[in-house]
Amino acid sequence: TDSLASTDPDIWAVVQDEAQRQEAHIELIASENYTSPAVLQALGSQLTNKYAEGYPGRRYYGGCEVVDRAETLAIQRACELFGAEAANVQPHSGSQANQAVFFALLQPGDRILGMDLNQGGHLTHGMPLNISGKWFQVSSYGLNAQCEIDYDAMERLAHQVRPRLIIAGASAYSLRIDFERFARVARAVGAYLMVDMAHYAGLVAAEQYPSPIPHADVVTTTTHKGLRGPRGGLILMKRSFARAIDAAIFPGLQGGPLMNVIAAKAVALREAATPAFVQHQRQVLRNAQVMAETLQARGLSIVSGRTESHLMLVDLRDSRLTGLDAQQLLEGLGLTCNKNAVPGDPRKAALTSGIRLGSPAMTTRGFGEDEARQVAVWVADALQAPEDEALLAQIRHQVRALCARFPVYR
Ligand code: PLP
């Protein structure tokens, strides 16, 4: 046969092993999720064979009439789900979606204002080694003493530097973001407002987190986090920006769009418009809350003191364990998470003093509050007794049993 197993046993083994790893670990990485079988099916379809440079109805290749339907549906569903005037579904990733906005709205050397990576921002928001940091003059805002976004300082900074673009959005911030406030500041200083809602898009789709759509000129997101779609990017915008943004994606930054991925985005957007998805996102919030409360009850510190989203940062500055130690310790138990700098982190970026925990993936596999609480207890047990081999062995065993009770793909 010409199946993957017989054509390429090496890669077949990788696929099998990764599927097994995903079943047998509890996924706590806040930016990860499990797509539906329908999304996987669209991704693995013949649509991957098609070149379709351009946009529906205006392509540079023949034979695009079928894939045009997929892209048109994806655009319509994205606009409907989020209440946006226009959408571009072609970005290959969240980073490329952000680059397209910069390419459309800015010139090299322009001033931008974004959230500091070390305080929860994303590297595409002006980190020095990223193209956003190399090509633009970056000013950064961060958190106040309570570890909430310091809106007053952000506003003062905006008036001081008068950026051409303000970026709101974060990768490691557990609270609601006041997008309206950002919009007021942007208007006052004559800046564009871009919101990167990658981490919150699933919650926003289900109206469980404030929507940036009414406030921002352009909203970017990934489609593979809370939205539970394929890896990729998406841009939502006011109609007046569509021409410039579309041109920035193609021919500005990308060539042929990935039509199988776009079809899979359409599938995920349809799934996200269902009542079941709203229930799921409510559970994502409840599970995150239970985890944060349980960790705090055990004496662990959560950055910002609480979560209003799917994620939390555990502050390990007082612990002997670095973030890296904690990540490795938990990994050994079947609990996958990532080390993450906390605000004012005294340790190096390679070590950090925190871990980031998220509830989306565990919720997708069916965990409710009981299971979320149990996971938090295991995390606390391990972090507080990292050398208790008997305890660790017991947790490892229990994690495996819980995973077996909640298969990801049946
Ligand atoms: N924006 C934010 C806020 C993110 O958290 C991420 C991913 O971690 C991205 C953009 C980048 O997305 P991608 O990894 O698809 O380039």
Image (cartoon, grey):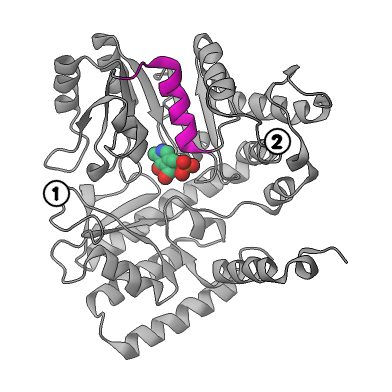
User: In the image, what residue type sits under mark 1?
Assistant: Gly
Q: Could you say which is closer to the camera, residue 91 or residue 251? A: 251
The chief SS type of the magenta part is: helix
Q: Could you say which is closer to the camera, residue 253 or residue 46? A: 253
- Residue drawn at x 34%, y 71% is 328
Specify start and end residues of the magenta stretch as a single range: 93-108
Is label 1 or label 2 in front?
2
Residue 98 falls within the magenta-colored stretch:
yes
Q: Could you say which is closer to the camera, residue 176 or residue 351? A: 351
- Residue sitting at the far right: 1
Give the structural element (helix, strand or loop) at label 1. loop
**Disc nearer the start of the sequence (1/2):** 2
- Residue sitting at the far bottom: 390
In the picture, measured across the screen, residue 45 lies left or right of residue 97, that is right
- Residue drawn at x 50%, y 70% is 25
User: In the image, what residue type sits under mark 2?
Assistant: Met
Image coordinates for residue 119, horizontal then vertical, percent: 23, 43
| Residue 153 disc label | none
Q: Quickly name the residue at label 2.
A: 259
Q: Is residue 196 above or below residue 281?
A: above
Image coordinates for residue 305, horizontal then vertical, percent: 21, 50
- Residue drawn at x 48%, y 33% is 96
Label 1, label 2: how far apart the Cα atoms are: 43 Å
| Residue 344 disc label | 1
In the picture, measured across the screen, residue 334 lies left or right of residue 174, that is right
